[in-house]
Amino acid sequence: MDIDFSRELKIAKKAALNAGNFLRKNKDNLNKTISSTKRDIKLQADIEAEKIIKDIIKNDSNFGILAEESGISSKESYKNLWVVDPLDGTANYSRSIPLCCVSIAMLSDAKPVLGVIYDFNNDELYEGSINTSACLNGRSIAVSKTKKTQEGVLVTGLPNNTDYSDEAMMEMIKNFQNWRKVRMIGSAALASVYVASGKADLYMENKSYLWDIAAGAAIVNAAGGEALILNQNEKFQVDVHFSNSLIKT
């Protein structure tokens, strides 16, 4: 089935806006821990926002869904597949750190071709696809023109299963030394659109999850950047390297 990008973008934006507004307006009731691990937390917010998104997509679209909380909607193979993260930056949301968002993507032949990310705290809606330009609240955005790491901003993170050994941390710090500034913001989706909109020059992280970064990949590409997704495993974990395509590492 071919993708009508205009139609599917409208569906994604509708779902993202509905879920994001719900998360913002009902935070006091939604900020309830369902489960937690040593380095992660799951809230009622994740579950209820995902239901809102899936209900809208199921009502308006015929494609399958891979969602963070409920997994894939069917065992059949999908050429085109929605990928949903109802709340990227859950730990930030739980502590009222305003760096979290709703992220909705579409994959075609396993490649991100459409993405919508709603930063509901700032009412900023990012979008992009292989058939449309990248936009923020309807205005075109583009990646930066920075060419040197010494003049650049790197955004990265520490996923749940990060190797915290001294050796691994020292290797990371050596990489940091090449950059003017390094930021860890706790949301892979926002890190991605910061690259797409020129706020940062590179987002790099290993063992992130596909639903965290799929929408951002589509938007980075639409903004003139280069979004590389590598080494996907059976848990949908991936290594990401999203850049303005000019800066070399």
Image (cartoon, helix red, strand yellow):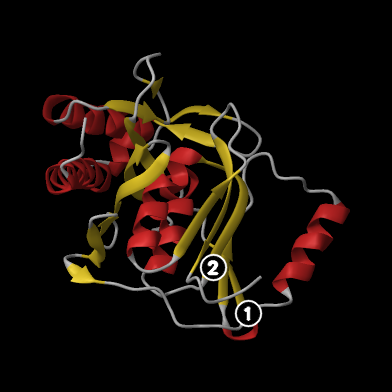
For the residues marked 1 and 2, what is the alpha-carbon distance in whole angstroms? 9 Å
Residue 168: image location, x then y, percent: 81, 53
Looking at the image, do the residues carrying marks 1 and 2 touch, with CB atoms under 8 Å apart? Answer: yes
Choose between 63 and 55: the one closer to the eye. Answer: 63
**Farthest-out residue, right:** 167
Considering only order in the chain, which callout, 2 or 1, is on the residue closer to the N terminus? 1
What SS does tag 1 mark?
helix
Q: State left or right for residue 161 relative to residue 70.
A: right
Residue 54 higher or lower than 9, as above or below? above
Query: Which residue is disc 1 drawn over?
Result: 149
Q: State left or right for residue 25 relative to residue 110.
A: left
Would residue 89 be visible to someone looking at this image?
Answer: no
Query: Which residue is disc 2 drawn over?
Result: 202
Residue 190 higher or lower than 140, as above or below? above
Q: Counting other residues with Cα less than 10 Å from the Cα at mark 1, is it few (<14), some (14-19), or many (20 or more)?
A: some
Q: Amino acid at mark 2?
A: Leu
Choose between 237 and 124: the one closer to the eye. Answer: 237
